[in-house]
Image (cartoon, helix red, strand yellow):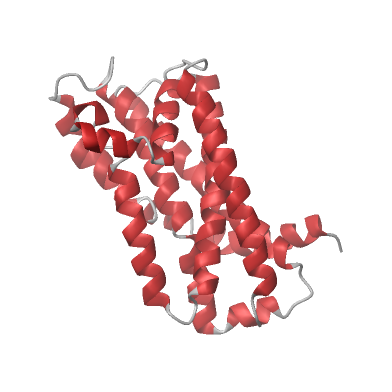
Amino acid sequence: MNRVSHTGIVFVREMRPGLRNPLGLVFQMAEPLVFLVLFGPLLAVMPSVGDGSTWQWFVPGIVVMLSLFGASGAGYLMLTEASAGTLERLLATPLRRTAILAGRTGKEVATLLVQALLIVLATLPVGFDPHPLGALVGLLLLAVFGVGLGSLSISLALAMRDQPSTFYGIQQGLLFPLLLLSGVLLPMDFAPDWLHTASRFNPLTYLVEAERALFAGDLAHPSVLWAALTAVAVAVVGLAVGARTMRRASC
């Protein structure tokens, strides 16, 4: 069997639990939904948030948040399997190690896209009006970014499978600074100069700006190019690190 077949086997294996329990998709969206429901109305009464509807500004950021939370949590499932002993059995199979990584990240991306679509559909009645082609390009960027971030999360989980608390510490220690510096919740234009400067070193910032432009239909916005370069760079680095870690993982 070739690498594509192996990837398909792993992808189906990873997707099966979610298909059996589709409500799990909704539960995984808990944090972004909380921000959407409880934080969104607060932005509606703030001046100078976005050029039009507050939801037009806020929803694309929530979709990026969903990508960040979902993809960065990919390693959690790896740790769960490691503690149950199923990871060792999986690594001992004839499946190619890179196919295991590809199948797992593919599952994370598929889940992310379904969840993002649910968020978009849920916000249409309250005034969110996404541009169809821009939204499609935006979701593609998120998928590429999710591949890289998911691979990095899996790599970290493999490296820390004997120290799961370290994995959670590193994940949480990186997750919230990236989120808060990206401008998902509040425009970074309101921030002090030093904080605004720090946000420019955050790759997530460019993705958030691009998603807002794309969902508004501005496909030629400069942020789209920067976000594409960022997403591709994260994907390349993540897959390279992930493939190397998988090959070196012991059974």
Q: Position of residue 239 (x, y in %)?
A: 63, 54
Q: Between residue 232 and residue 80, name the one nearer to us.
A: 232
Q: Position of residue 7 (x, y in %)?
A: 73, 58
Residue drawn at x 68%, y 77% as measured from the top left:
91
Query: Which part of the image, by quadrant, shows the C terminus?
Result: bottom right
Tell me which corner region of the image, top left, top right, bottom left or bottom right, holds residue 198: top left
Q: Position of residue 221 (x, y in %)?
A: 47, 17
Residue 109, visible in the rendered structure? no
> Is 179 left, or right, of 89 in this rendering?
left
Residue drawn at x 55%, y 65% as measured from the top left:
155
Residue drawn at x 50%, y 29% as measured from the top left:
226
Residue drawn at x 45%, y 45% as measured from the top left:
67
Query: Which part of the image, by quadrant, shows the N terminus?
Result: bottom right
Vertical arrangement, residue 223 with respect to residue 101, above or below: above
Vertical arrangement, residue 228 with respect to residue 52, above or below: below
Q: Between residue 147 and residue 237, name the one nearer to us.
A: 237
